[in-house]
Each structure stands twice: as C-alpha cells, then as structure tokens.
C-alpha cells in the first residue's frame, strides 16, 4: 500500500508541477493554458491521433526497456540513440536486398536489427570491460559516429538511392512487411506494437524471477557486494550492454516494417533520449515504463493541436523536460523519506530506543 | 557539573581551578528509529587526557560529532572554557579551538600533505611558502618527517594519522578529539602516539580520547567517562578502577572473551595455498609474493598484519575477486577431493564450499536497500534453497532467511525490511549466518566483529567456535589482536605481501605480534620468523 | 570517468620519480605537433594543412569546444559530472542571439553566460540539493535546454526572422591582426619553404583576424588554472571533488562550492554557445547548431586529464580536425590520416625502445591499417570527417583511460552529515 503510494505519488506530483510551470509560461506569453490543454485532450479523438499515440507508445516503450536494462545495474546506456539508428539502416539495407519467403523475411530483418544494435553496443561494453572506459562518454561518442555511419551508408553511391529530394535505402519487398491492424479512418496499429508488449513481459520475468535478473539488480545496488557474492561485474556489463543494444536495435522496427519500408532522411531522431526519460519516469518498472511511454506519446501527438489555438507546440518539449527533471527529484525526496520512515518503524517494532551510535 | 546517574560508581572528579575546557550537559540526539544520545553529561578539565569509553554503538561517535559541530543536538548545551556555544558547522567548533582526528581519516588522496593541512584554514598563513614553513615547524612535534608537497596517497597509515594531527594543530586547536586513534595502529605505533600525546599535554593541550580498548584507556587517560546505550553512566579515575570494573560500567557485565578452550585441529587439509602471487602493475613490487598457507579441518588460522600489507588482497585473491598472477589455491571438499580453484571465478569458489564474511559489510556484505531475504540469495544465487536452476526460489529464500533470523538472533521486525534498517551488529549476524549456511568446508572471515556491539560479538565468536568444533576450517583476518590470539590455533604474520613469521597463540602477546607486524624482528620465542627474507626493496 | 574492474588496492603505492613539469610537456607537445604537421604537409604535398586560413578556422571552431570543456573542468573538479553542458550551451546560443541582435556582441556574451549559468543552477539544484544522479540530471537538462530554446525561438525570433529555427542576424566582433607581423609571416608562408613556411602559416593564423572572444578564451584558460590551483577558493573547490566529507569536516561549505562550480560551469558552456553564434561563419542562432559540441568539450576535458593545459590541447586537436574538414574537404583530410600513420610510427619506435613488444605490435597493426585506408581511398567521405573527434576520443580513452586521473569523488552524490 505504502509502496504503491511511494511509486505513484512522485510522477503525479512531477506531472502536476510541470503542467503548472508550462501553464504559467503560457500565461506569461499571453495564451490561455486551459484552452491549450483542452485542445490537447480533445485532439485524442481527432483523426488518427489515438492510433498514432498507441504506435508511438510502442516505439518509446522499446527504447525505454533498452535503457532500463542498463539502469538496473547503474550502467548508463546513453547510446540507445545510436544503436537504433545503425540497426535501422543495416536492417533496412538487408531487408531491401534479400529475397525471402514472407514471415521469414520479416523475422530475419528483426534479427539483423537486434544483432546490429547489440554489436554497436558491444564496442563501449568491451571498452569498459577491458580498458575501464566510462560508458557514458563512449556511448555519446558512438552516437555521433552512428550519425556519420548512417549518413554514409545511405549515400547513393553506397547502399542508398535518390528519390526526388530524399535519399533512402532500397524499399523492402512486401514479404518483409509486418501487417498491422487497420482501423479504417482512425489509422493502422503497427503489428509490432505487440512485440513491445511481449518484450515488457519478458523483461519483468527476467528481472524478478531469474538468477540473471537478481545478479543485474545486485550489481546495480552495490558492485562491491555483488563481486563478493560471486557476480562477475565484467560479465554482467557485457551481457547487460549487449541485451540493451539488441533491444535498442528493435526500436525502429515497428515503423520500418509497418509503414515506411525503408530508411530515409526523415528518420526520426531523439527516440533514444526520450527512452531515457521514459525509463526514469517509469522507474525501470515495466508497468511504469508503459505509462511513461503513453504519456510521452500523448504529449507528442496531441501537441500538434496546439498550433490550432495559436500556441507554439514546442511548449510540449519544455513540459517533457520539466517532467523528467522534477520526477527524478521527487523520487529522490520520497526515497529518502521512506528510508527514514522504515528505520523509524523498525525502531518502534523492536521497541528499541536502542542507540545505534557510530553508523547513524 | 558532571553527574552520576548510577549510584555504585566512584565519585565524579571535581575541578579545582578555572572553568573546565569543555562541558556537555543534557545532550540528546535522535535519529529515525533510534536515540543515539540521551541526557549525556561530560566535563573535561583543561590539560587532561579524558577518555570516553563505551562499546560499539553506544553513541560515542555521535557525541563527538556533536561536539565538533558536524551534528546538532536536539537538546542540551555545550560550554567551552566557561562560555555557552552553539555549533552549526565544524567551522564554528574550530573557531573556539576544538579539533578532531577522525577514526576514518578525512584526507584527500589526490591532494598534497600541505593542501590537506591548510584546507579550510587558508586565512592563517595562506596556501604557499609561509604555510609550508609553519607545517614543517609543527611536523617536528608529531614526529612527521615528510615533504609537505607529497601526495597523501603515498603515505602509510601512521603517517596519515600524523597528518590528521597536524591539521588540528595547524588550526591552533587546544582541545583535540581523537576518535579511536589506535584502531589502525600496532602496539609499537600506539606507544609512539601516546608519547606524542603526553608531550603535547605538557604544552597545555587537552585531549578527548575515544576508545573501547580498556588497557589503552588506563595507560593514557587522567579520567574516564563511560557511556552506555546512549547515556553517560559516570566518570572515574582510571588509576583507581580495574579494567573489569570499567567493562562492567560499559556493558553491564563482563566483556566476552574470544578465548577458545581445547584444540579441535585435525590433520585433514582443507585449504592449501601454494606460491600465491599478485602483481598489480608490471614493474612494481608484487602485492602478494609467494604465499604458502595450509588450513586444516577444525583449525582457525589467523593472519596478523598492519593494514595495507596485503591481507585484503590475500583474501580477495583466494576468493577469486582478484586474479592471481601465480600459484595455486587448492580446496579439499568433504569427500576428500582436492581441486585447484585458481582459474575459477568467485561464484564457483563459493559453490566449492567457501563461506566468506567480507571486511566491510556495507560495501561488500549486503545489498542495503534490498529486503533481508534478497540478501540471503546473494552469493547463493545458483544453489538450493534460494534457487532452482536459472530461476530464483523466493519462497525457499524467505524460509531460510527466517531460519537465520531465529538461529542467529537477528533482531528485526521481519524479513521484508531493508537491510539498511538494521543495526550494525544485527547486519553482521545476518551475514555470518548466511555464510555458515550451505555447508561450507572453509570460512574466510575478515574482521568478523569490527564495529559491532558486544552482544553480537559474543554470538559471532560462539558461532565460529561451534562451526570449528564441527570440523570447519577458518581463515581469520583481524586487526583486533586480542580476537586474533583468542580465536586462532595458528597465527601467521603478514608484512609487505609476504607471510614472514609464525606465532603460537598460546604464548604470544599483542606486543610480540606488533613488532613482528612492523618488521622490527621477533622479540619473543613465541614468534618464529619464516625463512623468507624480508623484502628490503620496500624501504625505498 | 574511468575505473571499474577491480577495487583499488589497499596497499600504499611506492614513491614515484619526479616527472617532467607540465609546462615543459606542453611545449614538447606543441613542437611535436608542428613537426608532425609540417612533415605530413611536405610528404603529401598538401600545404593547406598549415595554411593561415585553416588555422583561423580551426581556432574559431575550437573556441566553443574549449569553453564547454572549461565548463566541464570547473564542475568535475568540484565533483559534479556535467553531461548537461550540451543543454547549457544550447541555452547560451539562444541567449547570445536574443541579446546580440538587439544590443551587439558584448551583450550577447553576457546574456549567453547568464542563460548558461541558469542551466548550471538547475543542475546544481538537482544534483547538490536533491542528490539526483548527475548523469540523469544532465540528460534531463539537455532535453529541457533544447525544448526551451525551441519554444522561445518560435515565440520571439519567428516574428522577426520568419523562421522558427533561426534568429535574426547577429552583429559580430571586429577582429584584430598584428599588422606588420602578420604581413611578414605571410611572405614567409608564401615562400613555400619546408618547415619555416609551415610555422609561419600556423603563427599567422593565430595572430590574424583575432576576435576578442579568442583572447577572452585564453584569459579564461589561464584564469581557470590560476583560480583552481593557486587560490584558496580553488583549493576548497577541488577538495570538494576529491573528498567532500573531509572538506566539510574542515569547515568548507561543500554545497556552496559545488553550487559555485556548477553555475560557473554553466556560464562557461553558455559563452561557448555564444562563440558559435558570434562565429563569422554563422548568421546567428540556428536550431541544432551545437551539434553535440558540449559533449565534445567534455571529451576534450577528459583527453586533457582534467587539467586546463591538456584541455587546451584536446580542444585544439578537435577544432583543427573540424576546421580542416570544413575548409578544405575530404581530400585534405586524408593527409591527416597520413599524419596519424607517421605519429604511430614514432610511437612504435618509442615502445620498441622501452621493450613493450605488445604495444609496439598493436601500433604496427594500427599503422598498417591506417596506411591501407590512406592508400586505397581518394578522399574521406564528408559524412564521416565531421565525426573524427568522436573517433579520436574513443581511441584516446581506449589507449590511455587507465592513466587518466579524474577527481576521486567525481560523480558521487554527496550528502551532508
């Protein structure tokens, strides 16, 4: 009971606080915040917005899971951004250049994406394990390199082709597509949204019921205690990073196999960083991440309605940034409060006013 | 000023001339769930060495943190030289002439001695040449002969302590708090420290000396105040009371003794370490060099050594947390099968039958924010009853945690509370209970009773003795020489990464061990030097 | 930002011999770099490597990296990891453009510093007061910085520039040249004599068309060194990054110093953003203009081992690679690869002398591979040259990370009491 409160209260407060902040910003810039928020909410019923939100939630969910695996052991995979981009290019090039039976083709593309993501993540992982290079810096650098590599690979004289003003990889034949669920004029739900859900369930089982999940959490809590308990830090780093990279590789699959069928210059950027925000918001819990991803997708897609009421839709980005920052602060404050409450409770139940000097 | 709350104690020592240096009255300090100090009274005369005695967890450190301005009391007052003071930060305490030498040294490794000393007191002599001159001048008093420009990371334990004292002197402190200053020193170094203190006492310095080692208190202190369960039980003249009386004041009964009665040593080898070596960096002196060691079933082998001579590394190399650069670690299991573990990882070594009580329970023994039952799994994540194959057995883990809680008297409201919520002694009981689960053939215990209360200490000693009687082989590392001598069947002395001497615990004294530990050579028949020559290279 | 694997040893390391002083090492490095460039320029026949224009562009591009790196240095010396430099830099670019197009370049600098400092203040509140993980807070600030500037640009720039992603044109600083000296060096450079012309070209690039911003940056580097290593303020600040508990026990107000350091860090990153906006090559603020330079600044700081001198070297290297690519394109850039081969050859000989066979063998293989690249392609694709700093950073970290020495308590959340 108290636990649930501890988990739900901070994000609720953070969202409220951020909404208030943005409301004030809107008032200062001369807009009506209530009208703006109203427009966002009513936008959900318009056109394909609801379906877009669901699709987008799936994508953010996968990205956040990739980040969360690393977070569980205090490994900061800032490189999801680069991993999904490289995986997308390589998978799109692969998918567009092979002929395989339907189904198997799509499966092969997904596999290639996961392996590519894992390989791209393997570089910082190996650097950390063998040379002690901090993964934050190395993955940031890998993100830069990923941009360069992707731009190079889709050059018309490498693997890409020129279409009007756009450069893209060869189109994946329909045998490699993953059909969605058409909902008429409301749009089409990506088939791979269900992959996201399956990944979430697998993630929960792994973290809570398996030895690997326990070792991952133990490493995150205290690397020294984990080492004394026989958990090999190097192995955990390697496995966690590869797993994180593999999942990151899947981020763009719903869109590429479900809609675009190619990688082009309009490829969405920044999903990796949104994934970090969503993972923080959901506190690495699969359910929490789902809610976080939904919120993020809602803000993204409904924000489009703001232009109609004369408000710049970038206010949504501010709101997202404010939510992340205030939610981590709120979690930290609540965590500290709860630890003290637990110590008080233990003290009361033991009837101690037994002094615990030195350590206290 | 000082008041006795217990009637059967010797009368409080009066104060003939002038106001006392420090008077604490009615100090109370609460933390979540505990009251660390309640109604504490303490009066320290000018120019005396005043000992503050109490067992681990009695609230000594909290009291000193209050006197040094690191924490604020909830109730009570502090008077320094007759004037009422209120400290909000250590800076306030420093201003009125109070200084503190912390038990865990407060030094920045990557700064020089000079930078460490002048930090926070730059206003006195700047941070340049003038400060350097002043430091060299003061260094003479503490016997520190070191270039102020050298990085602190290059200093040994005793020198670091001198730098700490130097810091206090540099600020012109007249009242100096020494928090367990002898914990990390060997007896010879303790003597040197005491000589320094006496010299400074003659120059008018006042000392507050915190300790739970009663013989040391009797050797140096002019008066002693005893604190028990957060409150002062009285002040006494250490010359007029016996150690036994002091102990009874401290814990309400006689102190437990680690003494083991009869030998249970068998001739069945359990652990055989051969030529074990560890080289941290190519081209440097090895951290471990040619270690040969045998532990037999039913035997406790103690390793004595000054901190930083490779004991930590020895344990971690035997446990597989560090890769040995040469040598073998052979473990013989209950069926008599010998197996070389040197290529295996830590988990495999644990599975082979090694239990491991690490030296720092907070950093290495426990997952502090996890519930007790999750802590039971740590180190046993591949074995029943806490796991089945790749899957955790949470029900099994909870059940076995409950067993440990009952058998080892872990005081907790339940097994779902976070480990951090327990007191140090209860945390350590949990760790020891866990490591004696799963039928180990060998227990490696690093400082198993460091920083725990006497109740937990007695229980842990009893459990180790019981397991030993049942045939467990134990490798014991401890800085507490009484514990080492009391529990061990054989003692080996470690110096600069080598085992340099054997000692017989039946006849050896802490002083003998101390001189062997510092490499001063054997002074007694109880210590027999091994034929490995002491590495003179280290003297550079 | 290194370390993992095994716990530090508890034994005391032996006394190390006195090393060559830092300034001498710097001089040797500069001399070596010039020698390498002029040799490469001679052997590959690419004079652009040391031309005045290249150096001028390099200096301009190095400035933002250098200033961001200095920002990182201040924060990390006080023990706060600042991944948020990028976001603070973005806020700086916006502030510079907003104040700059209205009141000129000096106002731009001040506004940029203020905006960056606000970002720093936010980071300090989160990490110091609330004890949030430094990386997490940094990432959040990057998101927030980007969002805030986008919103403000749409709100305030769009009505004037008619482009929500761009500010109105911002006036630049006048530049100054060392008149006679510059001309004399110019004639020397034109002679095309090996060595002398190269040195002349480099020097001329450094004294021609110098913006006050460049001079200011030099002052900042020297000033940061003096403040951090030669004053009591600096000693206290650094002690917070090495052992905050010890500092607190000596009466240092750790929170206060951390706040000061992180706010200063943000201000410097903001000025770094202003350096982008005030670069004569740019009209003003452009969305996405920083393009990860905050991160590169951080990399330059690590490259420089958390020291101002080393940071200067890192920023110069990255700025140079950037400038060469921008100025002369992929063909010239290829010459740099040749230069890298030469450098590796020297290092291999050095390792052979020290009898480090493994290191030497690795060097030979790497040099062989690089030479293969040099031999087989005509130019480096422009898509990849822009990310040369990223690659260099990875290589440097991989090779030298164990020798780098970051502040002991860097990135550790400190709680009082």
Image (cartoon, helix red, strand yellow):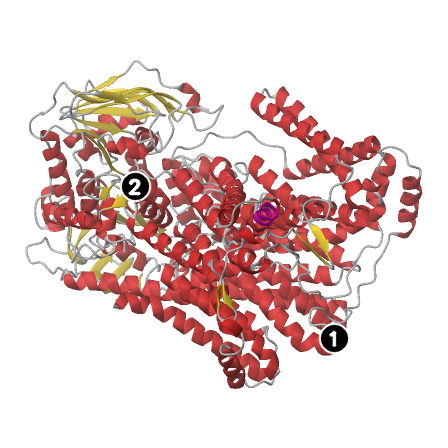
Residue of label 2: B198
Q: Do the residues labelled 2 and 1 touch (CB within 8 Å)?
A: no
Label 1 marks a residue whose chain is C
Q: Are marks 2 and 1 on the same chain?
A: no
Q: What stretch is highlighted in magenta?
A: A90-96
Q: Nearer the viewer, residue A87 or B30?
A: A87
* Dot label at residue C162: 1
**Residue B277: x percent and y percent?**
37, 22
Report the side of C143 relative to C51 (left or right).
left
Q: Which of B331 and A357 is in front in this view?
A: B331
Task: Report the predominant secondary structure element of the magenta stretch.
Answer: helix
Magenta stretch: includes residue B410? no
From what the image shows, is residue B447 above or below residue B38? above
Report the side of A260 relative to C42 (left or right).
left
Q: Nearer the viewer, residue A286 or C161?
A: A286
**Residue C22: x percent and y percent?**
64, 38
**Residue B27: x percent and y percent?**
23, 64
Label 2 marks a residue whose chain is B
Characterize the local packing of mark 2: few (<14), some (14-19) or many (20 or more) Cα atoms within 10 angstroms.
Answer: some
Q: Is residue A171 visible?
A: yes
Q: Measure the alpha-carbon separation of dots 2 and 1.
A: 82 Å
- Circle 2 sits in a helix, a strand or a loop, which is it? helix
The structure residue drawn at horizontal position 9% and vertical position 30%, both measured from the top left corner, is B469
**Residue C362: x percent and y percent?**
60, 27
* Dot label at residue B243: none
Magenta stretch: includes residue A92? yes
From what the image shows, is residue B452 above or below residue B299? below
Residue B429 lies in what quarter of the image?
A: top left
Q: Can residue C128 be seen in this view?
A: no
């Amino acid at each position: 009971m108290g636990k649930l409160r501890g988990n739900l209260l901070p994000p609720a407060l953070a969202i409220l606080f951020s909404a208030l902040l943005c409301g004030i910003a809107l008032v200062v810039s001369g807009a009506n915040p209530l009208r703006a928020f109203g427009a966002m909410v009513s936008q959900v019923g318009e056109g394909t917005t609801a379906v877009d939100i669901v699709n987008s939630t799936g994508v953010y969910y996968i990205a956040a899971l990739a980040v969360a695996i690393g977070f569980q052991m205090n490994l900061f995979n800032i490189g999801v951004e680069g991993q999904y981009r490289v995986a997308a290019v390589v998978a799109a090039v692969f998918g567009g250049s092979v002929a395989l039976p339907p189904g198997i083709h799509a499966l092969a593309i997904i596999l290639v994406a996961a392996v590519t993501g894992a390989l791209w993540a393997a570089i910082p992982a190996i650097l950390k394990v063998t040379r002690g290079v901090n993964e934050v810096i190395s993955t940031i650098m890998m993100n830069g390199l990923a941009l360069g590599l992707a731009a190079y690979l889709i050059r018309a004289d490498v693997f890409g082709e020129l279409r009007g003003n756009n450069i893209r990889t060869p189109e994946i034949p329909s045998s490699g597509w993953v059909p969605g669920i058409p909902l008429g004029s409301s749009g089409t739900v990506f088939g791979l949204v269900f992959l996201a859900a399956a990944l979430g369930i697998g993630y929960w089982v792994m973290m809570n019921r398996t030895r690997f999940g326990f070792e991952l959490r133990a490493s995150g809590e205290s690397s020294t205690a984990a080492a004394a308990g026989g958990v090999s830090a190097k192995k955990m780093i390697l496995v966690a990073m590869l797993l994180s990279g593999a999942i990151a590789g899947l981020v763009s699959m719903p869109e590429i196999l479900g809609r675009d069928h190619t990688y082009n210059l309009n490829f969405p950027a920044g999903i990796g960083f949104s994934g970090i925000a969503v993972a923080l918001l959901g506190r690495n819990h699969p359910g929490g991440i789902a809610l976080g991803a939904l919120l993020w997708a809602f803000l993204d897609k409904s924000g489009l309605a703001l232009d109609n009421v004369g408000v710049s839709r970038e206010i949504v980005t501010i709101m997202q940034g404010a939510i992340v920052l205030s939610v981590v602060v709120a979690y930290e404050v609540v965590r500290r409060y709860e630890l003290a409450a637990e110590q008080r409770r233990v003290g009361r139940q033991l009837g101690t006013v037994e002094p615990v000097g030195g350590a206290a | 000023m000082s008041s006795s709350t217990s009637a059967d104690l010797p009368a409080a020592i009066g104060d003939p001339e002038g106001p006392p240096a420090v008077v604490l009255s009615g100090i109370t300090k609460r933390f979540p769930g505990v009251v660390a100090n309640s109604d504490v009274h303490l009066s320290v005369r000018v120019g005396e060495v005043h000992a503050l005695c109490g067992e681990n967890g009695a609230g000594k450190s909290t009291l000193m943190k209050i006197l040094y301005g690191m924490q604020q009391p909830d109730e009570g007052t502090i008077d320094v030289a007759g004037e009422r003071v209120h400290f909000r930060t250590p800076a306030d305490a420093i201003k009125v002439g109070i200084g503190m030498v912390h038990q865990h040294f407060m030094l920045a490794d990557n700064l020089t001695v000079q930078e460490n000393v002048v930090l926070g007191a730059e206003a006195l002599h700047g941070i340049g040449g003038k400060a350097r001159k002043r430091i060299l001048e003061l260094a003479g008093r503490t016997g520190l002969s070191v270039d102020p420009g050298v990085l602190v990371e290059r200093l040994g334990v005793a020198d670091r302590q001198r730098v700490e004292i130097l810091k206090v002197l540099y600020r012109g402190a007249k009242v100096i708090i020494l928090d367990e200053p002898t914990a990390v020193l060997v007896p010879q170094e303790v003597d040197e420290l005491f000589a320094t203190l006496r010299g400074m006492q003659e120059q008018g310095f006042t000392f507050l000396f915190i300790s739970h080692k009663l013989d040391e208190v009797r050797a140096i202190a002019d008066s002693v105040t005893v604190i028990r369960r957060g409150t002062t039980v009285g002040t006494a003249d250490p010359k007029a009371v016996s150690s036994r009386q002091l102990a009874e004041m401290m814990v309400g009964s006689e102190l437990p003794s680690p003494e083991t009665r009869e030998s249970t040593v068998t001739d069945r080898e359990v652990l055989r370490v051969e030529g074990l070596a560890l080289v941290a960096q190519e081209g440097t002196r090895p951290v471990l060099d040619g270690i040969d060691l045998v532990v037999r079933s039913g035997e406790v082998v103690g390793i004595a050594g000054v901190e930083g001579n490779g004991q930590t590394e020895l344990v971690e190399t035997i446990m597989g947390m560090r890769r040995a650069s040469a040598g073998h670690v052979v473990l013989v299991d209950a069926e008599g099968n010998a197996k070389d573990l040197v290529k295996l990882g830590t988990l495999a070594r644990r599975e082979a039958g090694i239990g491991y009580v690490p030296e720092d329970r907070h950093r290495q023994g426990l997952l502090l924010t996890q519930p007790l039952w999750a802590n039971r799994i740590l180190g046993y994540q591949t074995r029943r009853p806490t796991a089945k194959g790749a899957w955790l057995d949470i029900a099994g883990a909870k059940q076995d945690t409950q067993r440990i809680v009952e058998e080892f008297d872990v005081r907790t409201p339940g097994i779902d509370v976070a480990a951090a919520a327990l007191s140090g002694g209860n945390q350590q009981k949990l760790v020891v209970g866990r490591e004696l689960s799963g039928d180990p053939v060998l227990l490696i215990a690093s400082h198993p009773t460091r920083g725990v209360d006497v109740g937990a200490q007695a229980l842990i000693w009893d459990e180790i003795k019981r397991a030993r009687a049942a045939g467990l082989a134990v490798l014991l590392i401890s800085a507490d020489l009484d514990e080492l001598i009391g529990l061990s069947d054989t003692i080996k002395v470690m110096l600069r990464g080598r085992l340099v001497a054997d000692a017989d615990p039946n006849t050896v004294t802490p002083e003998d061990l101390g001189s062997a530990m510092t490499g001063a050579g054997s002074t007694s028949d109880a210590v027999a030097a091994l034929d490995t020559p002491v590495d003179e290279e280290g003297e550079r | 930002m290194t370390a993992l694997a095994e716990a530090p040893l508890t034994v005391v390391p032996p006394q190390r011999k006195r090393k060559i002083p830092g300034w001498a090492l710097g001089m040797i490095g500069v001399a070596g770099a010039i020698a390498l460039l002029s040799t490469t320029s001679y052997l590959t026949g690419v004079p652009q490597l040391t031309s005045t224009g290249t150096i001028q562009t390099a200096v301009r591009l190095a400035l933002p990296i250098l200033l961001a790196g200095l920002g990182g240095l201040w924060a990390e010396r006080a023990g706060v990891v600042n991944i948020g430099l990028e976001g603070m830099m973005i806020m700086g670019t916006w502030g510079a453009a907003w104040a700059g197009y209205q009141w000129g370049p000096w106002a731009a600098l001040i506004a940029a510093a203020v905006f960056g400092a606000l970002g720093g203040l936010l980071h300090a509140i989160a990490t110091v007061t609330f004890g949030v993980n430094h990386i997490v807070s940094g990432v959040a600030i990057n998101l927030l910085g980007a969002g805030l500037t986008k919103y403000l640009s749409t709100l305030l720039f769009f009505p004037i520039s008619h482009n929500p992603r761009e500010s109105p044109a911002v006036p630049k600083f006048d530049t100054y040249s060392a008149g006679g000296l510059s001309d004399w060096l110019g004639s020397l450079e034109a002679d095309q004599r090996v060595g002398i012309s190269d040195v002349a070209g480099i020097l001329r690039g450094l004294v021609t068309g110098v913006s006050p911003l460049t001079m200011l940056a030099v002052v900042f580097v020297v000033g940061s060194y003096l403040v951090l290593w030669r004053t009591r303020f600096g000693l206290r600040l650094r002690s917070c990054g090495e052992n905050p508990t010890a500092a607190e026990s000596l009466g240092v107000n750790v929170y206060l110093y951390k706040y000061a350091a992180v706010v200063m860090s943000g201000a410097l990153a903001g000025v770094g953003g202003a350096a982008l906006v005030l670069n004569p090559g740019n009209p003003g603020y452009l969305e996405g203009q920083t393009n990860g330079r905050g991160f590169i600044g951080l990399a330059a700081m690590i490259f420089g081992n958390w020291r101002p001198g080393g940071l200067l070297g890192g920023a110069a290297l990255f700025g140079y690679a950037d400038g060469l690519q921008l100025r002369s394109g992929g063909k010239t850039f290829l010459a740099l690869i040749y230069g890298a081969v030469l450098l590796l050859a020297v290092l291999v000989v050095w390792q052979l002398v020290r009898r480090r066979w493994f290191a030497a063998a690795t060097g030979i293989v790497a040099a062989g591979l690089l030479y293969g690249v040099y031999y087989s392609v005509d130019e480096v694709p422009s898509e990849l040259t822009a990310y040369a700093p990223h690659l260099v950073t990875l290589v440097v970290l991989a090779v030298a990370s164990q020798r780098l020495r970051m502040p002991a308590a860097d990135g550790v959340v400190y709680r009082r009491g």
